[in-house]
Image: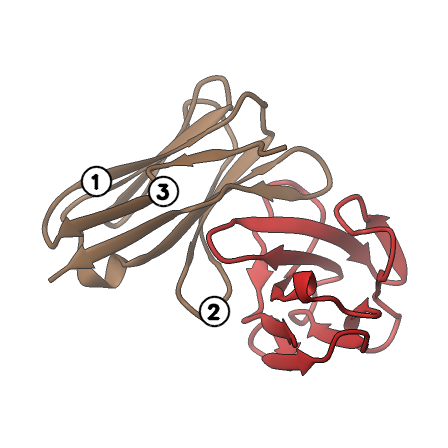
Amino acid sequence: TQLLEQSPQFLSIQEGENLTVYCNSSSVFSSLQWYRQEPGEGPVLLVTVVTGGEVKKLKRLTFQFGDARKDSSLHITAAQPGDTGLYLCAGNTGNQFYFGTGTSLTVIP
Amino acid sequence: NAGVMQNPRHLVRRRGQEARLRCSPMKGHSHVYWYRQLPEEGLKFMVYLQKENIIDESGMPKERFSAEFPKEGPSILRIQQVVRGDSAAYFCASSPGARPNYGYTFGSGTRLTVV
């Protein structure tokens, strides 16, 4: 059972463009996290959101947790080649986090 | 130790052999999680351990797979009689506690190839 669906699965954009990726579920999560993973490495935590409707900003990245705590979005402003990677959302339902399938982002210089 | 250490980074095993994957959590972290990742797929939860205890093993196959986190030493994920379908990247993560807003710190993974 796939608890978390991420879209789009693949995204290729030019440097300087804006983008939004989505993480959706029918389940309610007590918290949700976003990670970025580069090839050959483990995921690195970007942010944790806990409260429904919460918005967090990390430089050019804006994270939002849905009011019902079932979905989340990640918006990147003025994307840079260094943003390239696999973006994973993970929702907590108890003992551990369930991960989505990820959005693979490529930013072309 | 600045982070979660996993070894080996790459492991090749023939079908039927045993694979042992090791994970040393971050200093001060007593909670360890193992995940498996296949190409084009997300991370699949396998098992959650706290020192000497298995808290949740609902994602781990009942046969051939086992995990431990002894009082002293690293956590071990053990796969007996490996098959080609076990080929994947196995990631370990640690956290300082079980609260849901604690983030995980991941290791760089062990890439298991079964030939």
Chain identifier matching the brown colour in the rendered picture: A
The mark that comes first in sequence, 1 or 2, is 1
Q: Dot 1: within a 10 Å radius of its alpha carbon, few (fewer than 14), some, or many (20 or more) residues?
A: some
Q: Quadrant of the N terminus of chain A?
A: top right
From the viewer's perspective, tell me whether residue A98 is left or right of residue A44: right
Q: Dot 3: within a 10 Å radius of its alpha carbon, few (fewer than 14), some, or many (20 or more) residues?
A: some
Q: SS of the residue at dot 3? A: loop
Return the residue at label 3: A9
- Residue shown at the point (81%, 57%) measured from the top left: B50
Label 1 to label 2, Cα distance in Å? Answer: 24 Å
Select label 3 or label 1 by which is in front. Answer: 3
Give me the disc on residue B34.
Answer: none
| Colour of the chain lettered B | red
Q: Is residue A16 above or below residue B89?
A: above
Front residue of B42/B80: it is: B80
The colour scheme used to paint the residues is by chain
Return the residue at label 2: A41
| Disc 3 residue type (three-letter) | Gln
Q: Dot 2: within a 10 Å radius of its alpha carbon, few (fewer than 14), some, or many (20 or more) residues?
A: some
The mark that comes first in sequence, 2 or 3, is 3
Q: Are marks 1 and 2 on the same chain?
A: yes
- Could you say where residue A6 lies in the image, as x and y percent from the top left? 42, 36
Front residue of B55/B8: it is: B8
Q: Quadrant of the C terminus of chain A?
A: bottom left
| Disc 1 residue type (three-letter) | Leu
Return the residue at label 1: A19
- Residue shown at the point (70%, 56%) measured from the top left: B33
- To which chain does the residue with label 1 belong? A
